[in-house]
Image (cartoon, helix red, strand yellow):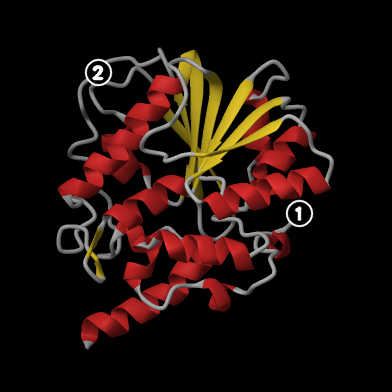
Amino acid sequence: MGDSGDHGRGSSPVDVAPLNASSYLDPHYWDERFAAEEHYEWLKDYSHFQHLLRPFLNPSHSVLEIGCGNSRLCEELRKDDVADMTCVDISPVAVERMRSRFRDKGLEGIKVVQADMLDLPFGSESFDIVIEKGTMVKAEMLFGFTEDVLFVNSGDPWNPHPETINKVMKMLEDVHSVLKPEGIFISISFGQPHFRRPLFEGASFTWSVEWKTFGEGFHYFFYILKKGRRILKSDDCKNERSDVPSISLLHEELEDEDYMFRTTLCDELEN
């Protein structure tokens, strides 16, 4: 699959993109979207980062994908011999359509569960690998809203709104909990390390943090967090800055749909 396969679906981005920012907060928006949309890959499809993920896969591993939506990542991982696969999404429509798709394709054994990423319904140390692709971005985006505006502490990506931080950290705490003692969390994002590290390196987490990049033109970040491997050292990331555009990290991460939506949001703010 190449770029042309990233967003194969029954509806175009224009058909399913929300009319305004607040629509992303509405569960009904997501249900309606998933009912109309056959397939959408937030960020890139598996072919773009397969070479990075494959070394961590083992047929004996249990793998959890959070925020699966209507992605085909689970199916692609099955082709790479992942037998014990679970994917979750908060939308009952997405879950039912995913189950139906797997039945139609004769894919057995992939568990699809309706669940909130802030309250994962699994016991501690249940999975060898947890994967999220764009879900953390959407969590930041969703919980960054105040009324009708995407709000991250006056648009400063270095100081996100406290509610945003609390929600994202809750998601990370749940991921850390369900990982086995030497489990690995894979986070695929457009979010740059100087924004991600303060979140990933929370005091309660025992994982090490490293990353690789993929993509041409725009770089996507493939974060690898290995539980139980953290090495405490001076917190040198607090003062780590680079020249970045004065645009919210939430706006810069979501690829084509967000590009279209950003234009709409800017118009709303100007008016």
Going 35% across and 32% down the picture, which residue do you hit? 172
Q: Position of residue 25 (x, y in %)?
A: 35, 61
Mark 2 to mark 1: distance in Å?
Answer: 41 Å
Q: Is residue 43 above or below residue 179?
A: below
Q: Position of residue 45 (x, y in %)?
A: 65, 51
Quarter containing the N terminus: bottom right
Furthest toward the bottom, the residue is: 271
In primary-sequence order, the first of circles 2 and 1 is 1
Element type at mark 1: loop
**Residue 208 appears anywhere in the view:** no
Which amino acid lies under the numbered mark 1 shown in the image of this protein? Met
Q: Position of residue 224 (x, y in %)?
A: 48, 30
Pick the front one: 79 or 201? 79
| Nearer the camera: disc 2 or disc 1 | 1
Which amino acid lies under the numbered mark 2 shown in the image of this protein? Lys
Quarter containing the C terminus: bottom left
Q: Is residue 180 above or below residue 173?
A: above
Going 66% across and 52% down the picture, which residue do you hit? 97
- In the rendered image, which residue does mark 2 sit on? 233
Determine whether label 2 and label 1 are within 8 Å by CB: no
Give the left or right position of residue 110, taking residue 187 as reference. Answer: right
Going 49% across and 12% down the picture, which residue do you hit? 182
Q: Any mark on residue 1, and which?
A: 1
Q: Is residue 233 above or below residue 65?
A: above
